[in-house]
Image (cartoon, helix red, strand yellow):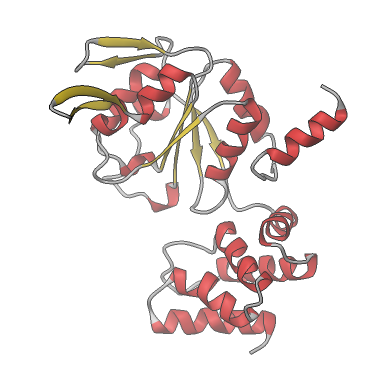
Amino acid sequence: MNAPVHAKLASQLPFYQPVADECTVFETAWRQQLPVLIKGPTGCGKTRFVAHMAAKLGLPLFTVSCHDDLSAADLVGRHLIAGGDTRWCDGPLTRAVREGGICYLDEVVEARKDTTVVLHPLTDDRRILPIERTGEELQAPPGFMLVVSFNPGYQHVLKTLKPSTRQRFVALSFDFPLPEVERAVVQHEGGVDERLAAQLVTLAGQIRRLTGYDLDEAVSTRLLVYCAKLIASGMGVRLACRTALVEPLSDEADTLAALMAVVDTQFGA
């Protein structure tokens, strides 16, 4: 492939700024038919990374946002009644296995426990998906890959992956990028200049280091991009910071006031 074609392909990929060797690990795991577990805080780039790698590898991507009511049937499929007839409808996991793409289960620990049982045969050397309701046993093709993610900092005893499940995956740990990387992301994705991107990243660092306030989540890179987009569209910096960086973090008046005070130290009241 010549240089212009490489450049064209890169421009079509979902933007992702590599931090370390995560792209190499992911691609090697795919070639070796290994499942991948991605750990990291909310909004640090896990989902964008998977989308980037799917496009880079030329694979269809089936993304499932897991939640409390997500069952094994939601992943595998179910019989539906249409026009008086009963027909089988594949779920996203089954479609990915049939078509040979990436099935990405975002925040997998939020799903019901019976989903784990379905994943196990796909995460060892068998690479099969038994479908009890149709009597099928699908063999995953070489292009199929199972990827799951979760936020370790937001777990409790009832929502965690059992060791027997975790040890079936190659694991990658994500965190908020280093300041120079995060600045590049905010500048590119948010459409602001380098100086403003640097100020927003500095502000995020100050808020992330803030102690004494009960914040479940820190300022994410995603929220920084949202804030940058608001500013790039003409919104005032203080209002953009309040709506994109402060209000999403807390409902407590004292905490909101403290966060705005940090904003004002960076940008002025």
Identify the residue at the far bottom of this view.
269
Q: Is residue 138 above or below residue 260?
A: above
Tell me: 104 left or right of 5: left
Q: Quadrant of the C terminus?
A: bottom right
Q: Nearer the viewer, residue 64 or 161?
A: 64
Instruction: Please tell me which residue lies in front, 249 or 216.
Output: 249
In terms of image quadrants, where is residue 268? bottom right
Farthest left residue?
84
75 or 175, which lies in front? 75
> Considering depth in this image, is 114 or 51 the residue closer to the camera?
51
Left or right, 190 with reference to 104: right
Rendering coords of residue 153 (x, y %): 43, 52
Furthest-right residue in this view:
3
The total number of labels drawn is 0
Q: Point out residue 62 in the picture as x, y percentages from the top left corner.
A: 45, 33
Residue 40: % across, % down:
51, 46
Task: Identify the residue at horizontal 81%, vertical 21% (top origin).
Answer: 1
Give percent across and percent down for residue 97: 42, 19
Relative side of 44 to 166, left or right: right
| Residue 4, above or below 123 | below
Tell me which residue sits at (73%, 66%) in the image.
192
Q: On screen, 169 above or below 11? A: above
